[in-house]
Amino acid sequence: MDTLRGRAETLKLARLLDVEPQQLAFLGELPVDDVRLFRERVVAALFDDDPALLDRIAAVTRLLPAGVAAGIAQKALGPRLAAALAGCLDPARAADIIDRLPACFTARCCHHVDPRRIAGIMGRLDDDIVVRVALVLAERGDHLTMGRFVGHLRDSALKSVLPRLDGPTLLRTGFVIDHPERLGHIVALLDDERVSSLIVAADDHGLWPEALGVAGMAGQQRARIASLTAAQPEARLDSLIRVTAEQDLWESLLPLVSLLSEDELRAVAALPVLRDPAVLGGLVRGVVATGLWAYLLPVVRVLPPSARRVVARVAGALDDADLDALARGVDEKGLRELVRPLIELMDDTARRRLLALPAFGARRR
Amino acid sequence: MSAEELAALRVELGTPPPVGFDSLDGTHARSLAQALRRARRRRASGLNEAVEDALTLVPALTREPVRRMFFRQG
């Protein structure tokens, strides 16, 4: 999950700094929460040193009727200055002026608004203008700006706008949402058919990483998303797993798989792609890197025998440090019963190495 | 990153970067500081240009007094 959160954070920071995201790829090596914190400090650095003249213009604006101020904003100030002024005004006053602006102008302003001011303004805007602005932003493909706003929308506005946004827009926007804690609630507003259509869109538009990111942030809706995904045709699940393997996103997929029912889990485990040694090898290495044995072992339990043997072979070939990490993970999580069938499939050398490890074998004997 | 590079990033940020950024190498730290400096300059110059553009709509006779009012120091 951190890989995907890191990608989303990099996109957001690149937008703030107006650089290409690839230029900030090195941020993927840093803890994602530190990158988020850095982005918040960049917001403060960019918006807190706005010139004093903004306050003076804002002071004049306060004296004008909202309609006149809206006219001036549109005809004279332009989106950049109008957005900066919105940050200086009382949120109620800013909302009063925005209500009188055309949606296309407001949408152009949104990109320049201080993200910290959005909550205060959004809560005061009529649903109608919010929906129209969202549609303009979607039309412009400005998902990053939508991601800043969507977490602040009231249910009434969400219910109006969600059916009018296409699948790729929802996935791309959800991926970069600034308030991920709202995502579960937003997904709950979508019926099963719509969620399934988003899964189809993820496959059709090459958006599996975005979909995994959204699913991982969807709180109590994660199990529903996982279940609806497991019900997809084999070819679609094959595509999901191959993308996961190619981009090493097991840390995002496995926690979702762990939410499946026994029957769903068996259906997933029977997928042909999970007999591919390259995929299984990547899966084990991904789990070694993230320590997610508690998520992997229940899947291994229901894999076909040939696939289980591949996992056992890859696990048995881990170096001492990784094998020790496996043993400690299994011990700490109380997963010995789950790992035993895997150990039995290892060759003698690997089995002896594992059982000799202090974290596992010593206590076992 | 060196103390010098950390200081440069801190100056642009106005506050120390998060602890995890200590592991950034010097090139990346400089690149971040530079990108932030450019972004801040762009924002400031963009706002000033927008004000100047807006002033062109003010009648010529009153433009200078309005400019002085908005751009006065202090």
Image: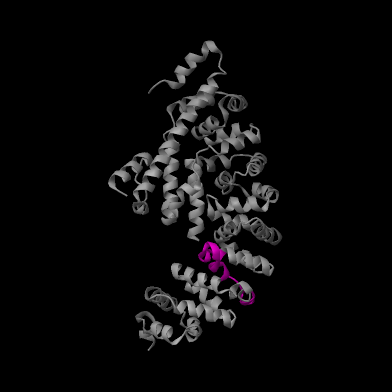
Query: In this orientation, does residue A325 appear?
Result: yes
Picture colour scheme: one colour
Instruction: Tell me which residue sits at (69%, 47%) in the image.
Output: A160
Q: Could you tell me which quadrant the C terminus of chain A lies in?
A: bottom left
Q: Which residues are magenta?
A: A244-267
Instruction: Tell me which residue sits at (52%, 66%) in the image.
Output: A250
Residue A313: x percent and y percent?
A: 49, 80
Q: Is residue A192 above or below residue A11?
A: below
Q: Is residue A21 above or below residue A354?
A: above
Main secondary structure found in the magenta portion: helix
In the figure, is residue A266 to the left or right of A283? right
Q: Nearer the viewer, residue A206 or A260?
A: A206
Query: In this orientation, does residue A89 appear?
Result: no
Residue A147: x percent and y percent?
A: 56, 48
Residue A339: x percent and y percent?
A: 48, 81
In the figure, is residue A238 to the left or right of A19? right
User: Is A265 contained in the magenta span?
Assistant: yes
